[in-house]
Amino acid sequence: MNMLNLLFRKTSIANRLMGMLALAISATLIVFWFSLNRVETVLVDEKEAKLHALVDAAVTIADKFYQDNQSQLLPEATAKELALAAIDKLRYSGNEYYFSIDTQGTMIQHAFAKQLVNTSVRGMKDPNGVALFELMIQGTESADAVRVDYMWNKPQQDQPSPKMSVVKRFRPWG
């Protein structure tokens, strides 16, 4: 204690003030960094929760047509066709859309990339090598829903941008 006290007494007031200023700036930067990381986590969690709710809305639409089929109101093929057509028209947050793949990896509905419909997308990878559709299929084999982060071209854009998808399997139709 005497050594520390002696060190502070020998340090000039200007140096003590500079030390306190450096300590205050360091503490402020550390708090700012932790706050920024926390805000990012909260925003990502909030977006994921929103996507879960939006996917549930699409599943509700599919379930309505499934129930119509089960009640003998529609043949199964017609019910599936009408469900996909309804989901194809859905939009959220302006220009965001839904897409549907089957368990074999065939794109059965996409609001914008019509060239992908009825093609196998299971082996497709994003620019970073993420096998996004494979992750979606595998993830929904054991879980109710799965989140997949990847890069994808948004409508009317040439450069891929980060995307987050929440995927849910409609089990009655596979």
Image (tube, grey):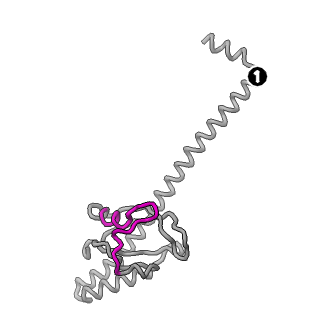
Residue at numbered disc 1: 13
The secondary structure that most of the magenta stretch takes on is: loop
Nearer the observer, 108 or 174: 108
Question: Does residue 43 sit above or below 120 in this rendering?
Answer: above
* Residue 75, quarter of the rendered image: bottom left
The percent position of residue 85, horizontal first and vertical second, equals 38, 84
Nearer the observer, 126 or 165: 126
Quadrant containing the C terminus in the rendered view: bottom left
The percent position of residue 58, horizontal first and vertical second, equals 38, 75
Q: Secondary structure at mark 1?
A: helix
Q: Which residues are magenta?
A: 118-138
Q: The residue under label 1 is which amino acid type?
A: Ile
* Residue 168, quarter of the rendered image: bottom left
- Crowd rating for badge 1 (residues with CA inside 10 Å; few <14, some 14–19, many 20+): few
Compared across the picture, whether 11 is left or right of 70 comes to: right
Compared across the picture, whether 104 is left or right of 58 comes to: left
Nearer the observer, 137 or 73: 137
Count of numbered circles on the image: 1
Compared across the picture, whether 13 is left or right of 22 comes to: right
Residue 153 among magenta residues: no
**Residue at x 67% of width, y 15% of height:** 7
* Residue 22, quarter of the rendered image: top right
**Residue at x 77% of width, y 25% of height:** 14
The percent position of residue 30, horizontal first and vertical second, equals 59, 39
Quadrant containing the N terminus in the rendered view: top right
Residue 121 among magenta residues: yes
**Residue at x 28% of width, y 71% of height:** 103
**Residue at x 48% of width, y 57% of height:** 44
Question: Does residue 74 sit above or below 11 in this rendering?
Answer: below
